[in-house]
Image (cartoon, rainbow, N blue to C red):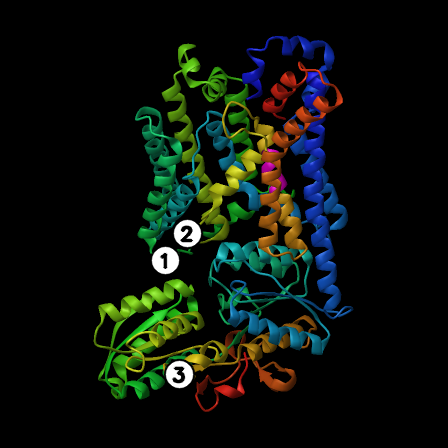
Amino acid sequence: MKFQKRRTTALAALALTATFAFAGCGSDDGGNGGSSGSGSEGGDLSITMLPKNLGNPYFDTSTDGAEAAAEEIGAELEEVGPETASPDAQVSYINTVAQQGQDALILSANDPEALCDALEEARSADVKIVTFDADTNPECRDLFVNQATAEGIAAKQLELISEQIGGEGEIAILSAAANATNQNAWIEMMETELAENPDYANIELVDTVYGDDDDQKSFDQTEALLQNHPDLKGIISPTTVGIAAAARYLSDSEYKGKVALTGLGTPNQMREYVENGTVEAFALWNPGDLGALATYAAAALANGDISGEEGDTFEAGDLGEFEVDADGVVLLGEPFTFNADNIGDFDF
Amino acid sequence: MSTATQAPAAPTRTYADYSAPLWKRLLLTRETAVIALTVAVFVYATLNVENFDGPLTVKFLLQDIAPILLIALPMTLIIITGEIDLSVASIMGLSSVLLGVFHDSGMSIPAAAALALLAGLACGALNGFLIAYVGLPSLAVTIGTLALFRGIAVGLLGTTAITQFTDTWADLATDTIGETRIPLVMIPFAVLAIAFTVLLHFSTFGRGVYEIGLNDEAAHFTGVDVARTKFILFVLSGVVSAFAGIYFTLRYGSARGDNATGYELQVIAAVLLGGVSIFGGRGRLHGVLAGVVLIGVISSALRLESVTVNVTNIIVGLLLVASVVLPSVLGWAGSRLPRKASADPAGPRPDKDAATAGV
């Protein structure tokens, strides 16, 4: 009696756990079938888009641009990514791309060095690697689609903040993670520029803090900055999450209109704060264009139209013709300034 | 727990002697269920998931789960004694950072790794001392050291990363054995797995481990050195976690303070899924290893299907909850059914025993 009971229990447990597992697999199967069905079926090229992390509006926009471009050239594009922006989380996805034997991978790297082994392996499985937004070491990828030169971005942000604070006073930087490739390059250039350019002789950079691209942490860091530096005149936040969080703090605080804020932001996130006067002007490129350009570049590579050598040229739909510069870099263009006059024209 | 109810109820054994043949008693266990499920999911994925049968799958799968496989070994023993070690992932992070920092300061990788292992040993010894000799509850102690070790790791390196590791060593972490698809890290894992199997299932030390989990006072009176056993287990856990941290660092080529955050829950989930009772006293290593592989196969198959990581987490979570809850629910249902069928008052009692015995 007793043993029979245990046996049935064991069997039932097995059966039910199996049902759970298979239900899981089954449902995902269906989901995937649906999504690839809704994409451009029958496209010759399969491209995977791997942003730093999912749920980031900036990368949502670049993926939208990439999907539009993929549709135009008849490629199949899917987006995958980790929850948190860490390099080891991206490795599994790069491995998966190698397993699937995709034609190309479009990637925003969370670390310039750590992903190289995995990328190397994917390339030996004949996957073309295009980085966008954040690069890896040049030898680990085929092309890098650069949103703007670091010099251009650094200069643009200093120009904006200098205009807004009248050319003198204390400023601070609210950055993303402390090991973020882009932000560190820009900050370094801004520091050099501040030290060397006589136009900025009266501007002093008093602090650099890191909000880790986390809304709440950036918000808290803004508050701490303003408390620690009562004479602060302006904040530069070269990250979309940071500038939006800082603007949200400023617009509800006594510092609204007194402390200038600029940096890199997206029009949809910043519209409210530009309209209510918290932020005068900020800069960015169009991440949608960036994603689209990366997709055209990936397709050109995968089709064998270009090899990624310096001087190669390729067509990128409405964006025009682009040329590959030294080190396999393709430049999107100059950063764009958004202000109250033009922000209504943009929706991303 | 099963042994707990079986030990006093000696008749159970006589029932077993004639009510079910040996193979049934060996096969109809929780461990067999997990192994069967793992095989089933693997076969299902091979047949239905595109590219799952590709040459790279096994390699990447084993590389992904290697740290969890490693830590699951000592974790199984610790949970069987009724304790828990939540600090394993933080020890991984700390050993990762130490490897990076020492290597960065000019040490060779083996020397830096040896120091990282020593640090792991020290971390484990701290846990073990507080739990075994001071007598504090392991849950509280290891939650504390989880924060402590992680704090030291992040404090040492800030939020920067060290990524320059000698290629020969980084390659060792990602290479496979000869022409096969088995990663090299499976060799140390196999050695450790055999060592832990012998320790748990074929030694007096291992019988002491089960006894502590069932009743540590009784264990003490039958001559088991409870404190020493627990201390050794936590030290082993620290060293193995540090080794997993070194592997993790070399595999991903980056030493960061936040490396392996959250791994402790993956390890514990796999151990529980593998049939180890969280209350101690029951569980076997082969079930646990199957549990780790099961989670690995599911995540790998779902990634190939481009399912987001959230969905994978939901499925693994459901599986875990199901594996913990189902035996009790079924036992309860089982005890209800015969009461309806026959109003035999003696019926429910053995059934309830069977329910708590679990499967």
Dominant secondary structure (helix, strand or loop) of the stretch shown in magenta: helix
Q: Residue A152 in the image: x percent, y percent?
A: 42, 83
Q: Earlier in the sequence, mark 2 or mark 1?
A: 1
Q: Give, as a single range, the part of the protein colored magenta.
A: B289-295
Residue bearing the label numbered 2: B258
Q: Are marks 1 and 3 in contact (CB under 8 Å)?
A: no
* Residue in front for this viewpoint, A70 or A277: A277
Residue bearing the label numbered 1: B159
The lab-note entry on whether marks 2 and 3 share a chain reads no
* Residue in front for this viewpoint, B319 or B105: B319
Residue, x 65% and y 77% (percent of image)? A69
Let me know if residue A12 is in the magenta part: no
Relative to A151, is A124 above or below? above
Q: CA distance from mark 2 to mark 3?
A: 39 Å
Mark 2: few, some, or many residues within 10 Å (few <14, many ≥20)?
A: many
Residue, x 40% and y 53% (percent of image)? B256
* Residue in front for this viewpoint, B27 or B121: B27
The residue mark sitting in front, 2 or 3, is: 3
Q: Which residue type does callout 3 highlight? A: Asn
Left or right of B338 on screen, residue A284: left
Q: Quadrant of residue A162?
A: bottom left
Q: Are marks 2 and 1 in contact (CB under 8 Å)?
A: yes
Relative to A36, is B356 above or below? above
Mark 1: few, some, or many residues within 10 Å (few <14, many ≥20)?
A: some
Residue bearing the label numbered 3: A276
